[in-house]
Image (cartoon, grey):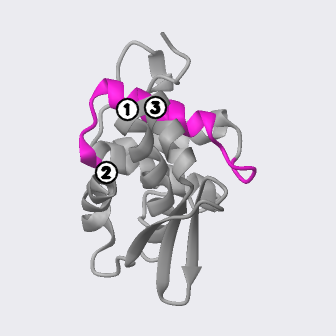
């Protein structure tokens, strides 16, 4: 999948030389999207209908965001950066990695908005509220070279509901 390659390339420099080997699998019984670690093997499983729906609604930006979050879970175990807050949960850390990937992929405003909207619309039960997640995404984005849009005060990047 071409989009998975973009996410991997964006985060590769952040985890070298300890990057996990990831495999992406279609699985019609998966609960949308999940990361599975089986010994030394790390797999991302996705339900094809879930990816189709996310793509139809949010395009490449949506799929990139979902993959970046899952890859964030995988690399966080091998290369936690000093800029991440020690008190962040694994979900917030994966969000920060996703924000970092957004910056490294140099997403345009439309794809960035689609990615944020996708992450806000498809939370798992383990995710905290969007108001808690967005600052972690913003932190990852800025720490990896992204510039937050101006015009929204000190809050930073627009939320998916901003017009």
Residue reaching furthest to the bottom: 39
Of the image marks 3 and 1, the number of the one nearer the N terminus: 3
Q: Look at the picture and state if 26 lies above or below 98.
A: below
Of the image marks 2 and 3, the number of the one nearer the N terminus: 2
Q: Secondary structure at mark 1?
A: helix
Query: Which mark is in front, 2 or 1?
Result: 2
Residue 77 visible in the current orientation: no
Say which residue appears at 38% left-offset and 43% top-offset. Answer: 141
Q: CA distance from mark 3 to mark 1?
A: 16 Å
**Residue receiving disc 2:** 3
Is residue 56 on the magenta stretch?
Answer: no
Residue 156 or residue 163, whichever sits in front: 163
Residue 35 or residue 78, whichever sits in front: 35
Q: Secondary structure at mark 3?
A: helix
Of the image marks 2 and 1, the number of the one nearer the N terminus: 2
Q: CA distance from mark 2 to mark 1?
A: 14 Å
| Left or right: 28 in relation to 152 | right
Residue 109 or residue 52, whichever sits in front: 52
Q: Look at the picture and state if 83 lies above or below 153.
A: below
**Residue receiving disc 1:** 112
Say which residue appears at 67% left-offset and 56% top-offset. Answer: 31
Q: Which residues are magenta?
A: 104-127
Residue reaching furthest to the right: 125
């Amino acid at each position: 999948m071409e989009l998975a390659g973009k996410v991997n390339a964006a985060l590769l420099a952040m985890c070298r030389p300890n990057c996990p080997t990831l495999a992406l699998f279609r699985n019609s019984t998966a609960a949308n999207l999940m990361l599975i670690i089986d010994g030394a093997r790390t797999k991302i499983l996705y339900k094809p209908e879930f990816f189709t729906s996310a793509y139809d609604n949010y395009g490449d930006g949506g799929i990139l965001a979902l993959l970046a979050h899952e890859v964030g879970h995988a690399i966080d175990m091998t290369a936690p950066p000093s800029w991440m807050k020690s008190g962040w949960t694994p979900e917030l850390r994966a969000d920060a990695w996703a924000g970092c990937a957004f910056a490294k992929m140099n997403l345009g405003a439309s794809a960035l908005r689609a990615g944020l909207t996708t992450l806000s619309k498809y939370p798992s039960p383990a995710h905290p509220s969007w108001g808690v997640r967005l600052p972690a995404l913003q932190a990852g984005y800025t720490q990896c070279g992204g510039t937050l849009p101006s015009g929204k005060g000190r809050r930073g990047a627009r939320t998916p509901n901003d017009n």
